[in-house]
Image (cartoon, rainbow, N blue to C red):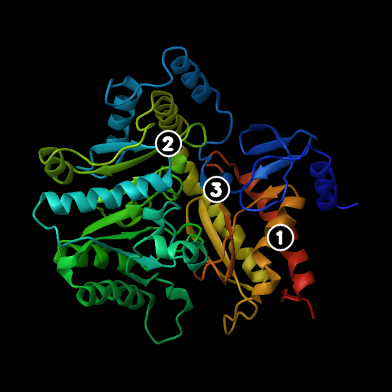
Amino acid sequence: MSKAQTAVQDTDARRRSHLFYLSSLRRPLIDRAEGIYMWTQDGRRFIDGSSGPMVANIGHSNRNVLDAMKRQMDRATFAYRLHFENEPAEELARELAGKLPEGMDRIFFVSGGSEATESCIKLARQWAVATGQASRWKVITRFPSYHGGTLGSLSITGDDALAETFTPMMRVMPTVPAPTAWRDRDNLSMEQRGVRYADMLEEKILAEGPESVVAFIMEPIGGAATAALVAPDSYYARIREICDRYGILLIHDEVMSGAGRTGKFLGGDHWNCKPDIVALSKGLGSGYAPLGALAAPMRLVEPLLASGGFQHGHTYAGNPLACAAGLAVLGEMDRLDLIANAAAMGNVLMDGLKELAKRFPFIADVRGKGLLTGAEMVADPDTLKPIEQGKKATQRLLDLAYERGLIIYGRRVKGGVDGDNFMVAPPMIVTGEQVGEIISIIGDSLEALAGEFDLPVEGRG
């Protein structure tokens, strides 16, 4: 009996669940987690090779974080921002501001990534109104991209599969192509392609009318929608230049790439590309508590405060327990030097993935920074023809890895409806030996996938 069949039997034997989520698929019950490992109640061990959905940056069950949360629980678990200030929120904001680009020192806490990106675009709009630029309301985004699941954040998400049902309920924002320069077949250098993709933003601004555009939002290093896509270096400075030219705010969605995962505190730090507003979440709370943040300079916040305040808020904004967790997470990043480890282990991981690409030519591209990496799979590496959509190759690979005790991540990379990939993003505490084990399991899973779908393997006739 296969592990997959065992998993089905295990879950089918359980009582009927009253929960619903993405599908009716049942999964094993979690028992405990520690470091990069997770165990089910029936004793199976899994390597968390994606940190959940790129959340558990410092690993599971870190004792110092748990102790900090316990100390706060003994004092107060909730205090509403309109009634009280709380020390963990104040200290976390101070610590966070010290890790961000100079001047990015005003923090607004939320509970997750969708709240963070929606807060960013609402801040941008209210700033425009407060400064006499009420005609500015459009937020240009990239296609494909992912910025969240609420109606506001979904309006700036370039993903047909997610947005189509809800389009009549929201105001969809204009898009420009994501910088998928590796796919292009032309005579341009990668640096020239980077400039060309950036210039598409200027073309869109002019088409929409500069006076109507308030912001451009982008992931400096792609998330699930583009599988850790990295633009050519030339792209970033050119984007900053274009935004400055037209008085448009640059928003960096660092929900997945921030909090040290890429080997810098922010993904944009790799290019010294300073945004006007930053969205953070996921690794900021590292799975210990729901936590996210908007960060902005005082020059954007002051006009709002002077005109009556930020017309926005959430019940759990600045929750003392969540902020105590976040403060301890940042402390553990520093104590264990995890950002440096993410950079070093990211190099090891990237080398391993590139070796797999040599062995399995249907891996057409390997990309990412630090411990945020992705690989795109195609049916034909010469033409980049995608694998037949009905085969659901991404999900099959994820299932094959899961059967072997490894959790990796994936989503279709062409607007959510086509294009297969997988992402590998283990916790930042990962060791070289553990990276080797992850690569070995992925290799076994790719071998099985190739056999099932008749995909090319180096050395096979």
Task: Give yes or no for contact between labels 2 and 1 (Cβ–Cβ under 8 Å).
Answer: no
In the rendered image, the residue lying farthest to the right is 1
As displayed, is residue 166 above or below residue 406?
Answer: below
Question: Residue 133 in the image: x percent, y percent?
Answer: 11, 58
Q: Name the residue that disc number 2 marks.
A: 291
Q: Does label 1 or label 3 sit earlier along the sequence?
A: 3
Viewer-proximal residue among 163 and 391: 163
In the rendered image, the residue lying farthest to the bottom is 187
Question: Residue 20 in the image: x percent, y percent?
Answer: 64, 46
Which circle marks residue 53 in the picture?
3
Within-10-Å neighbours for mark 2: few <14, some 14–19, many 20+: many
Q: Determine which quarter of the picture holds residue 156.
A: bottom left
Q: Which type of secondary structure does the marked residue at label 2 adopt?
A: loop
The residue at the point 29 percent across, 71 percent down is 198
Q: Which type of secondary structure does the marked residue at label 1 adopt?
A: helix
Q: Amino acid at mark 1?
A: Gly
As displayed, is residue 4 above or below residue 182?
Answer: above
Q: Nearer the viewer, mark 2 or mark 1?
A: 2
Q: CA distance from mark 3 to mark 2?
A: 14 Å
Q: Amino acid at mark 2?
A: Leu
Q: Does label 2 or label 1 sit earlier along the sequence?
A: 2
Within-10-Å neighbours for mark 1: few <14, some 14–19, many 20+: many
